[in-house]
Image: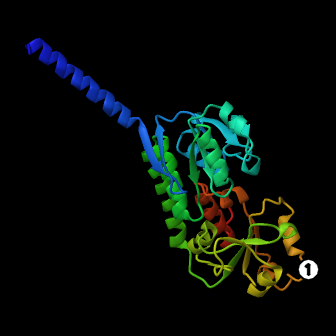
Amino acid sequence: MSKKLVSLFLALLMICSMVNVTAENNTITVTDMFDREITIEGPVTRVIAMEPSDCEILYALGCGDALVGRGKYCDYPAAVLEVPAVQAGQELNLEEILALNSQVVIMADMAQTKEQVTLLEQNGVKVIVTDGNNIEEVYENIRLLGKIMGKEAEAEAVITDMQKTFADVAAKSEKTEKTIYFEVMPLEWGLWSAGANTFMHELAEICGMKNAFADIEGWQQVSQEQVIERNPDYIVLVTGMGETAVDEVMGRAGWENITAIKNGTVYNADSYAMTRPAPRLAEAVVNLYNFLNGVTE
């Protein structure tokens, strides 16, 4: 073989090697919160996020421009309202999603079904499922979305900021036996509260308090009798029922002897910041600490 042919052969090998490396670098493989391994051809520049928490995470990572669609309840930050909305939950509309020609659809375990995920995948849509019950799982979600969007360093920075806020609040919070009752669903719809293995439970602990329903797992329905019996020192409302929420709770028949009612320690929290598994949980814990300690900004 002549020197010219050898040089040409080596050059072709180098080109093929570069093509293979580029292809490998553009392939993203992740394991989602359904423990499903998904391979995506990157870079990801067109994405639909069905859940408000995932929209918030994407904006925190600096990926708002990649959103081509959002679930209809996604409302933060304000810029997301400019993104086309699609039906979410049980009303999921396959045609709406396919029309947006996204590379990836991000869906939440709580809001969507496995059947819906399967239907989308059968129609050629890559689906990433998220799930954030506790703070550690929120971190996992942030890392997951950071990886598919090529924003892994930004994801770690967001997590570090959250961890610092949690650590700062914990450091200045005194441990106490006082209890918090989180009202997640209002009385008219059937009371629900947050138990162990939830980020609300952890926010109470960060603030040095105990969760009045630490003996239940996850989010569960509770009764008025249980709330009255547990006699919480604080009531935190995350029901999204507006300005009248505190007055409604303060005036409930049979609740007048609850310590929180007698002391007027009922807090109408920013329900979106405190209920969404997203970076604003750090904001929520600061506001909760301020309420518990009478701090006014």
Secondary structure found at label 1 = loop
Residue 64, horizontal then vertical, whole percent:
59, 38
Quadrant in the rendering for residue 295: bottom right
Give the quadrant of the C terminus: bottom right
Look at the picture and state if 37 lies above or below 3.
below
Residue 8, horizontal then vertical, whole percent:
18, 16
Q: Is residue 66 visible?
A: yes
Look at the picture and state if 20 lies above or below 39.
above
- The answer to which of 260 and 92 lies nearer the viewer is 92
- The answer to which of 250 and 100 lies nearer the viewer is 100
Q: Which residue is mark 1?
A: 253
Q: Is residue 49 visible?
A: no
- The answer to which of 87 and 153 lies nearer the viewer is 87
Quadrant in the rendering for residue 3: top left
Colour scheme shown: rainbow
* Residue located farthest toward the left when viewing the structure as drawn: 2
Residue at left 8%, top 16%? 1
Residue at left 61%, top 58%? 277
Side of 278 where 212 appears, left or right? right
Residue at left 61%, top 64%? 285
Residue at left 64%, top 81%? 215
Side of 90 where 79 appears, left or right? left
Q: Name which residue type carries label 1.
A: Ala
Residue 2, horizontal then vertical, whole percent:
8, 13
